[in-house]
Image (cartoon, rainbow, N blue to C red):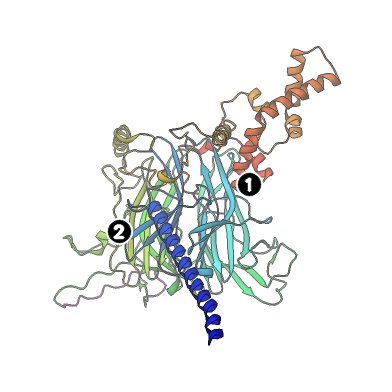
Amino acid sequence: MAKKKSGSTPKSTAKAAKKAKAAQKTERKEKKKVGKSKNEDDDEDLEGPPSRRANATLTACPNGNHLWCIGGEFFSEDKKAYFYKDVFRYTPEKDEWRTFVSQTCPGPRSAHAVVASPAGGGKLFLFGGEFSSLHQNTFHHYGDFWCFDLTTHSWDRIDTKIRPSARSGHRMAIWKHYIVLFGGFYDPGITTRYLNDLWVFDTQEYKWRQIEFRDTDLKPSPRSGFSFLPTPDGIVLHGGYCKEYVKGKRPVGVMLSDTWFLKMSLSPTPSASAAKPKSADTSPLTLKWERRKRPAYAPSLRSGCTMALWASKNTGVLFGGVTDEDTGEETLESVFWNDLYGYQLDGKGRWISLTLKRPKPKGGAKKKKKPAVEGSDSGDDTDHGKAVAPKSPTNKLPVLAVVSQEPEIDPDDPILTVPLARYNAMLAVLRNTLYIYGGIYERGSREYTLDDFYALPLDKLDRYVCLKESGVVIADGEESSSEDDDDDDDDDDEDGDDDEDDGGDDDGGGEETVKPGGVQDKHDNDSDEEPAGDEPSPEDALRLQATAFMGVSKDTTRSAEDVVSTPLPGETLAMFYARSREHWKQKAFSTSDNRGKQLRRDGFGLAQERYAEYKPILQEVEKILAEAGLNEEEMRRGAAGGPAGSNTGESRNRR
């Protein structure tokens, strides 16, 4: 018995120690959880949804619970540019917005592309985009690739040797475990170069591959701002925008309405007729472009209207857009839309008009059905509403093409809930509900960046629900397009001047009632202004110098001497001296009696001193551009390409 008792003592002690250790572990987990929730509360946007912005992304959670809004841009009345990098999450059940901030995250940007994957609890993949400094004297495209984990709310940068070039306005779609990227544009400051290259990223191998086609193969023309929707058999591409450059003439914007199908399949041995990856490895993935015929019934020609995928019905949903008409050298007439269409992705594709359904009359009296309007492929009802094509309105007012025949206004008429006409609205379909956030509306020469938020049950099509009203104030005639009388436009300009006086501060105010900085101002400084308070650290001071240098290097008012005697980002000493040899030779000649080889040495010494003076700043600039995903060649090309702000004051949003 004594032996048994002495043997049980260490056993019970070990059990007690194990319990204590488990209790400590549980306590640490609880503390960590509490700390994490506190951090989330600190980062939570308690003031509501994102501030006004355009060219952000709105993405449905692959697990069907939330909407995610990332980045965006806002241009204020005083020509200041605000770019954002914040991540917002919207929960429909609670009508609640939260923002998530991470120390490691993509830089502020707009016109990027985001695609969602359900793998590993849900991930968002982001590629590219663009950034401009506060005063638009610095501009660059991004060529970086990021992954946002929806469970840990953390960013990871994916660096690969082979990857797509820096760009904006491109689109991505996910097919099985492949992310497919197409098109976009690159603007070094002289001309905008539109792209039509195709890339595939394998989320299992974490590798990019460029897909090359033969010259005789059919493929879409270069473009940006198009729709790119996955199907079980591939990806559908529709529409987009590009510019045509003719020597001696101004560039002309082109709206595209063609539809393509990228047929994709996995097979043990790729077929010889299909395109193959550029890399030497054997991939089971085969891809082939097929052009779809334009159906008899389709939306009017327009741009600025990217479709969102209604996955449960395998249908793309299109809302709004803008139709531009060049009427002269300096005149551009625009028609803005707020109509709703569906594109059935199956088969050869088919457009349907998603018109709102009128409520049944009270008392049970049945009204006679109106005859279907001609223009649709079929008069049959669909799961999404009637496939009835409304006639195109003869007037160009931005109203939905559904006109009530009753002289009196019915307060229950669903047309009264339709949002204002706009283009570049952010769309996403979560379950069976379409969400529309913001967009851009123009009146005369002025752009209004909207911040309203709507929901529409696509399975009911009864009425739009306004989840957030717009804080933007539009002058008299806000329901008019830019074709209105010149007098009206003049009135608007006068109103705009008054509004600028009221709110034209550094926060980017104007006639609007919302500050452009939004929540972003609490977390980071996206502009190139020096923050108030204590003096910056040496690292921060160098970053400010580098940012300022990036703006100065693109200033067209600099003298030729200043341009040739200043090294460029990505330029080595040898390259700098080769470019500016004659300048330094003249400098040495004016200060020295040496000639010949010694004079060249003196000139090289002057160039070396100049390069050494700028070297720390150049290294910091190269660091900034490398963070944006640019290689040395792209750095030099961008630095020598002229001012990025050449489009300042013009609408960039058609791109």
Is the residue marked by circle 1 packed among few (<14), some (14-19), or many (20+) residues within 10 Å? many
In the image, 293 versus 503, the foreground residue is 503
| Picture quadrant where residue 460 is located | bottom left
Tell me if residue 118 comes above or below residue 562 in the rendering. below
Q: Is residue 379 magenta?
A: yes
In the image, 379 versus 464, the foreground residue is 464
* Predominant secondary structure, magenta span: loop
x%, y% of residue 465? 28, 62
Q: Which residue is drawn at 29% across and 73% down?
A: 371
The residue where tag 1 is placed is 630
> Looking at the picture, which amino acid does disc 1 mark?
Leu
In the image, 620 versus 366, the foreground residue is 620
> Looking at the picture, which amino acid does disc 2 mark?
Leu
Q: Is residue 119 magenta?
A: no
The residue where tag 2 is placed is 467
Residue 394 vs residue 230: left or right?
Answer: left
x%, y% of residue 211? 66, 62
Magenta stretch, residue numbers: 364-380
Query: Looking at this rendering, what residue extends furthest in the front direction?
Result: 2
Query: Looking at this rendering, what residue extends furthest in the top direction?
Result: 593
Q: Which residue is drawn at 76% across and 17% down?
A: 588
Is any atom of residue 640 visible in this view? Answer: no
Q: Which residue is drawn at 75% across and 13% down?
A: 591
